[in-house]
Image: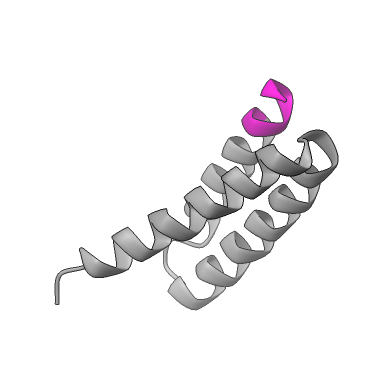
């Protein structure tokens, strides 16, 4: 699990660096990475753990969208 999270963070940082000047591609790559990470988590976590993870992710996204400044 630690290795999976570490690899995810390294890949996310690489995307941040490589696509810093192209927000559209950056966002697309990050979304693909997140989908891949979620699929990998689903194979490692129990169903209850995965459900809690997805609920947490949904709540974090909702919170971040309400706190964005214009």
Residue 55: x percent and y percent?
53, 53
Q: How is the image coloured?
A: one colour
Residue 42 image point, x, y percent: 78, 46
Which residue: 70% across, 51% down? 38
Q: Quadrant of the N terminus?
A: top right
Q: Is residue 3 magenta?
A: yes
Outermost residue, left direction? Answer: 70
Residue under the image location 15 percent in, 70 percent down: 69
**Which residue appears farthest toward the right when viewing the image?**
43
Where's the C terminus, which quadrant?
bottom left
Q: Is residue 65 above or below residue 41?
A: below
Residue that extends furthest to the top in the rendered view of this protein: 2
Q: Quick one: 14 or 12, which is closer to the camera? A: 12
Give the quarter of the image for residue 25. Answer: bottom right
Q: Position of residue 68 (x, y in %)?
A: 21, 67
Describe residue 10's horizontal placement relative to residue 23 as left or right.
right
- Residue 26 lies left or right of residue 63; in this view the side is right
Magenta stretch in the rendered image: 1-6
Which quadrant would residue 62 be assigned to in this image? bottom left
Q: How many marks?
A: 0
Q: Position of residue 48 (x, y in %)?
A: 70, 41
Q: Main secondary structure of the magenta part?
A: helix
């Amino acid at each position: 699990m630690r290795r999976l999270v570490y690899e995810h963070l390294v890949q996310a940082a690489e995307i941040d660096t490589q696509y810093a000047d192209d927000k559209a591609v950056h966002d697309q790559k990050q979304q693909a990475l997140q989908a891949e990470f979620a699929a990998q988590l689903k194979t490692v976590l129990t169903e209850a753990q995965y459900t809690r993870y997805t609920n947490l992710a949904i709540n974090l996204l909702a919170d971040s969208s309400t706190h964005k400044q214009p």
